[in-house]
Amino acid sequence: MRTTRAAILLALVAAPALGAGLAPTPSDMLGPFYPDVLPQDTDEDLVQIRGAARPAVGQVLELVGRVTDTNGQPLAGVRLELWQTDAHGRYIHSGDPEPARRDPGFQGFGVALTDAMGRYRFRTVVPGGYWTRPPHHHIRLLIEGQEVLVTQLYHPGRTREPGIGGAALSSREAAQTLRLRQGERLVPVGEFDFIIDLATPRPRR
Ligand SMILES: [Fe+2]
């Protein structure tokens, strides 16, 4: 009897609370290309600039997923900011070293808000790489104007770059890489769920 009670107590102490303990999405560098001037159109569709004659060039990609806390609870009303290169590897930032190669049809920056289920959706293109960097999406998440995460997302099999190896590469592949699948009308879908540690205070920028 005593053994059984002791075992139950041990199990209660050792087991995490139901649904708790999800590992937060790792942060990553902001980088130098967060837009210095935001575009006029900042909606979640980076492929089509409002009023533009043509859409962006390149492979269209739906970027979808959810935002939850470390208990798995959906977070509604989270502002997600996405900025990335166009298909040619160019940013809309004025400091991009090769502005002549930039695709004027690509919005370069967009904002999405999570719904009541914590879901978000962007429409973008597969970014071109630049320098020694593989294709990546920069993402910043804010709750009520407070930054809660800055990170970068990668594509399966395209995570490697000089200076990133060992544990850093393993973490990138496990926790910062899209799940790719074929969506409707053969448009590829990249899925990623963000897990936010709300308990960790973050400085305002
Ligand atoms: Fe970048």
Image (cartoon, grey):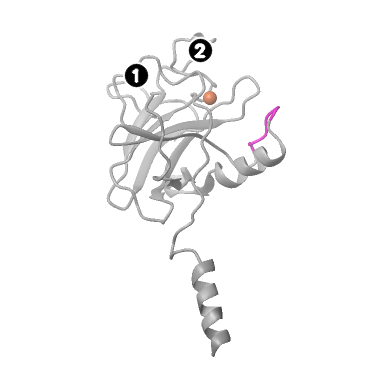
Dot 2, crowdedness within 10 Å: few (<14), some or many (≥20)? Answer: some
In percent of width and height, residue 190 lies at 49, 44
Residue at figure coordinates x 38%, y 29% from the top left: 46
Q: Does the magenta stretch include residue 69?
A: no
The secondary element bearing badge 2 is classed as loop
* Of 81 and 28, the residue lying toward us: 28
**Quarter of the figure with the C terminus:** top left
Question: What kind of secondary structure does the magenta stretch mostly adopt?
Answer: loop
The secondary element bearing badge 1 is classed as loop
Q: What residue type is labelled 1?
A: Leu
In percent of width and height, residue 36 lies at 40, 14
Total tally of numbered discs in the picture: 2
Q: Does the residue labelled 2 lie within 8 Å of ligand 1?
A: no
Left or right of 98? Residue 41 is left
Residue position for label 1: 38
* Of 21 and 58, the residue lying toward us: 21
In percent of width and height, residue 113 lies at 30, 39
Q: Does the residue labelled 1 lie within 8 Å of ligand 1?
A: no
Left or right of 158? Residue 56 is left
Q: Earlier in the sequence, mark 1 or mark 2?
A: 1
In percent of width and height, residue 189 lies at 47, 45
Dot 1, crowdedness within 10 Å: few (<14), some or many (≥20)? Answer: some
**Quarter of the figure with the N terminus:** bottom right
* Of 44 and 175, the residue lying toward us: 175
Q: Residue furthest front?
A: 2
C-alpha distance separating marks 1 and 2:
14 Å
Residue at figure coordinates x 42%, y 23% from the top left: 108
What range is drawn magenta here? Answer: 158-163
* Of 83 and 11, the residue lying toward us: 11
Which quadrant of the view contains residue 92? top left
Residue position for label 2: 96
